[in-house]
Image: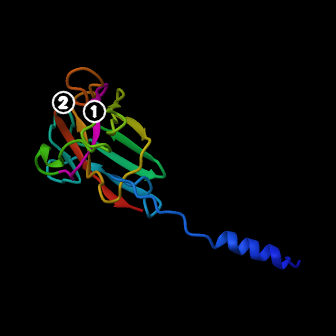
Amino acid sequence: MRVPALLLVLLTAACAGPPAPVQNFAGTSEVSPTGGIKLSGGGEFSPTDTSAIVYDGKLVPKGAQASATVESSGNTTRTSLVVEGLLPDHRYGAHLHTKPCGAKPDDSGPHFQHHRGEVSPSSEVWLDVATNGDGAGRSTARNDWALDPSDLPGSLVLHSEATKTSGPGVGTAGVRVACLTLKKGS
């Protein structure tokens, strides 16, 4: 099929306009340039292995293990946690933290916050997990923001208590009892 010359001129002129302006957002990027970010960590908790380290052997017994996955794309971040061998019928707080796990509980830094200084489930990842009678449990959190590839969380920390959702101490969850270092994956 042959396209009339006038139609070709109009189409070419319409497509040859100035490019759309580039939108720069202050702070974090909403979409990863690679199309998505995946972080994961896990293993059997040990007192010496900082990829899955235990700080309190009473609340995280020998043989306990966990795996965590953080997937971020578009304007959504989903974080999943699966645990086994923890105390039965116990509720643990779980949050993303800014740094990888270390030998000391505070080595993982403060809670990771999408909006710095904002303590809330919309800025932080609150992933509390309740174990069943066998000490197993799973939890998933969904946040309506994407991770910034230049500012990623370094760990997922298990805390001794459930996260306080209101009042004094909002966002706290007791002492750090175990930690999973998160690493970039595909």
Q: Please indicate whether residue 19 sits to the left or right of residue 27 in the image.
A: right
Q: Amino acid at mark 1?
A: Gly
Position of 47 relative to 161 (above/below): below
Which quadrant is the N terminus positioned in? bottom right
Task: Measuring from the top left, give residue 83's x and y in whole percent.
Answer: 34, 40
Q: Amino acid at mark 2?
A: Gly
Task: Measuring from the top left, give residue 86's x and y in whole percent.
Answer: 27, 35
Task: Measuring from the top left, give residue 85's x and y in whole percent.
Answer: 29, 37
Work out which residue is located at the far left of the displayed protein and give it.
104
Q: Which residue does the image show at 14% across and 41% down from the upper left?
A: 55
**Residue holding disc 2:** 174
Q: Nearer the viewer, residue 1 or 119?
A: 1
Q: Which residue does the image show at 50% across and 63% down from the upper left?
A: 21
Work out which residue is located at the far right of the displayed protein and give it.
1
Q: Nearer the viewer, residue 92 or 9?
A: 9
Secondary structure of the residue carrying tag 1 is strand
The reply to whether the magenta stretch includes residue 131 is no
Which quadrant is the C terminus positioned in? bottom left
Q: Nearer the viewer, residue 15 or 153?
A: 15
**Residue holding disc 1:** 93
- Contact between marks 2 and 1 (CB within 8 A): the answer is yes
Task: Measuring from the top left, give residue 128's x and y in whole percent.
Answer: 33, 32
Q: Nearer the viewer, residue 64 or 72?
A: 72
Q: Which residue does the image show at 21% across and 37% down from the upper left?
A: 61
Q: Earlier in the sequence, mark 2 or mark 1?
A: 1
Q: Which residues are magenta?
A: 87-101
Q: Which residue does the image show at 20% across and 33% down from the upper left?
A: 59
